[in-house]
Amino acid sequence: MIKPTCEDTFLLKHRDLKNGYHSLTFQSYSRVKQCRPGQFVHVQLPGCDIFFRRAFSVAAVDLEKRQIEIILKVFGRGSKALSALHREDRVNMLGPLGVPFRMPRKKEKTVIVAGGVGFPPLMFLATSMVARGYDPKNIEFFYGGRTAADIIERSRIKKLGVNFHPVTEDGSLGVKGLVTEPVEEFIVDRKRSEVKLYGCGPEGMLKATNDLGVRLGVGGQISLEAPMPCGVGICLGCVVPLTAGGHARVCCDGPVFEIGEVAL
C-alpha cells in the first residue's frame, strides 16, 4: 500500500472550460506515478476561511513533468475559490487517496458511462487503458449531460480513438435522452460476460448505471461522490450502506465499488 503525501504544489495552467467547468493543472507533484484512475486528491483551499479540504478526482497526469490535472465545476464556496486561482498560486495537496478502478481484461468490451463532474476519472481511465496498449475501438465512452454545454473536453476524448457516444437530455448533442438508455441498448446485443461497465456521475445517473449492471448481470465498477471532510476515513462523513449489510466509507473503502455492492 502506497502512503499518501501532503505537499505544496503550484498552479501551472488554468483553463476555463465554460458552463462553470474549470481545468487546473498543478506542477511539481511528487506522486504522479502513484496516481491511478478513480483515485482522488484532497486539496486545501488557499487564502480563505474554509477549513476542510475538498476532494477532486484525478483527471490526468504527466509523469515526466510531474503534473497533475483536476477538473471541477463551480457548485459552492470551495469550488468557487479554486476556480479563482491563477498561475503560480500555491495549494497543498494530500494524496493520492482512495481505491482505484480495476482494469478490465484486454479482450473485454469496456463500456464507460460518464456524467457531469463524474467525467474526469473516467477520462483518466480511458487514457490509461490506451496508454497500456488496449484497443481504443474496444472502449465505448458514453457521456451524458443536460445540454451540449455539459459535454466538455469532447475533442480530447475523441483524440484517444475510443468510440464516443454523447447523449443530451435536450438533444442538442448526440442522442436525445438519458445516457443509460443507449448504454442498455448497446449491452443487450452483446455477451454479458464479455462486457465491463464503469460509471461515475450524478446520483441519479449512477444509480441507474448500477441498477442496469445488476439487472443485466454485467460486472464492473462505479465511483461514488460524497462529502469527504477528512478524506482518510476518520470523520465518517461519507458513509454509505452496503447491499450485503453494514456500511463503507467512500473515501477509503472507495470511492470505487463493485456494481451492486452499494445500496444506492
Image (cartoon, rainbow, N blue to C red):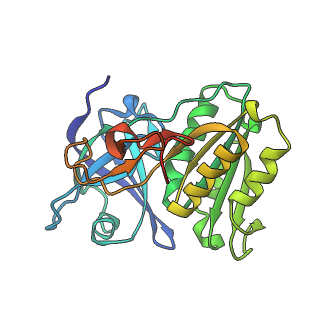
**Residue at image coords 39%, 70%:** 74
Question: Which quadrant holds residue 131?
Answer: top right
From this view, report whether residue 49 is shown above or below residue 65.
below
Q: Residue 244 at x, y = what percent?
A: 46, 39
Residue 93 in view in this figure: yes
Furthest residue to the right?
Answer: 189
Determine if residue 156 is in view. no
Residue at position x 48%, y 50% from top?
A: 263
> Is 224 left, or right, of 83 in this rendering?
right
| Displayed quadrant of residue 232 | top left
Q: Quadrant of the N terminus?
A: top left
Counting from the top left corner in percent of width and height, residue 245 is at 41, 41
Near-viewer residue (103 or 58): 103
Tell whether 115 sits left or right of 60.
right
Query: Which residue appears at 48% of the width and 38% of the height?
Result: 37
x, y percent for residue 199: 58, 48
Left or right, 122 with respect to 248, comes to: right
Q: Nearer the viewer, residue 109 or 34?
A: 109
Q: Give the residue at x 35% y 44%.
A: 247
| Position of 260 relative to 175 (above/below) | above
